[in-house]
Amino acid sequence: MSWEEKEIETKYDLTPFMMKEGEIDWELEEKQGVMNEVEAAAKISRLYPYFRYCPLSQTLFMYDGTTGMFTSSRSNINLKLLQLSKYIHFMDEKQGVYARSPVNSYATKERSRNSMYSFLESLNIQPDFMRSMVNSSLGYLLFKNGIYDFKTMTFTMGFIRISCFITELRETMKN
């Protein structure tokens, strides 16, 4: 068995897919800081509304736009929080005036990020999440480059719809 060198992928889909144009003023959101972990979790849930907490399995899921699947991987969730870190900077007090910290963010500080998890979970509870998603991917095949729909016999590039896929085919769909 030989090992081949592979560059670590640092890119991650940060586009606010499935959000209407002009729905969020990203520049304004970046200028406004947050006071605590509760506000940070609420802001993250508003900016990226694709978190689901299933109390039965006690698992926080996040829709991953790069794979087209929900993931419960802590590292993927941390990566998304780090990408959104510029929107959840601390508010620092200087001589009685609060200002957005240019450096400190709730996503970049491990202790703050870990304490945000419980708030993300409580803000995104969906008890029937697993049950409602069980049949959502029936009739579809997930490829690396999109989704094939057996009902309509069509292939859609990318991952537009949110479906719960268990696994993906390691191939790309060819015409």
Image (tube, helix red, strand yellow):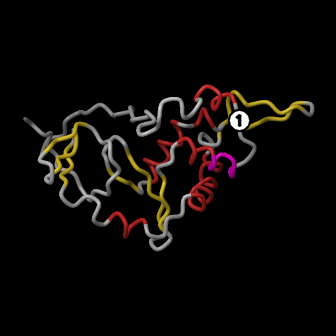
Q: Identify which residue is drawn at 28% across, 56% down.
A: 165
Whether residue 87 is in magenta: the answer is no
From this viewpoint, which residue is outermost toward the front?
152
User: Which of the 4 image quarters holds residue 131?
Assistant: bottom left
User: Would you say 49 lies left or right of 137 here?
Assistant: right
Majority secondary structure of magenta residues: helix
Identify which residue, 17 or 122, lies in the foreground: 17
Rendered view: 131 above or below 110: below
Residue nearest the viewer, comparing 167 with 6: 167
The image shows residue 149 at horizontal and vertical percentages of 17, 49
Q: In this view, which residue lies farthest toward the right?
A: 95
Above or below, 71 against 90 in this view is below
Residue 36 picture location, percent across and down? 73, 47
Measured as percent of width and height from the top left, residue 61 is found at: 44, 57
Q: Residue furthest left?
A: 175
Q: Residue at x 50, y 62 (%)?
A: 53
Q: Element under label 1? A: loop
Residue 39 falls inside the magenta stretch? yes
Picture layout, residue 54 above or below residue 165: below
The quarter of the image holding the C terminus is top left
The kind of residue tagged 1 is Gly
Q: Crowding at label 1, few (<14), some or many (≥20) Cα neighbours within 10 Å?
A: many
Identify which residue is drawn at 18% across, 52% down. 141
State the count of labels: 1
Is residue 174 shown left or right of residue 91? left
| Quadrant of the rendered image containing residue 93 | top right
**Which residues make up the magenta segment?**
37-42
How far across and how far down the image is residue 100, in percent? 74, 31
Q: Which residue corresponds to mark 1? A: 33
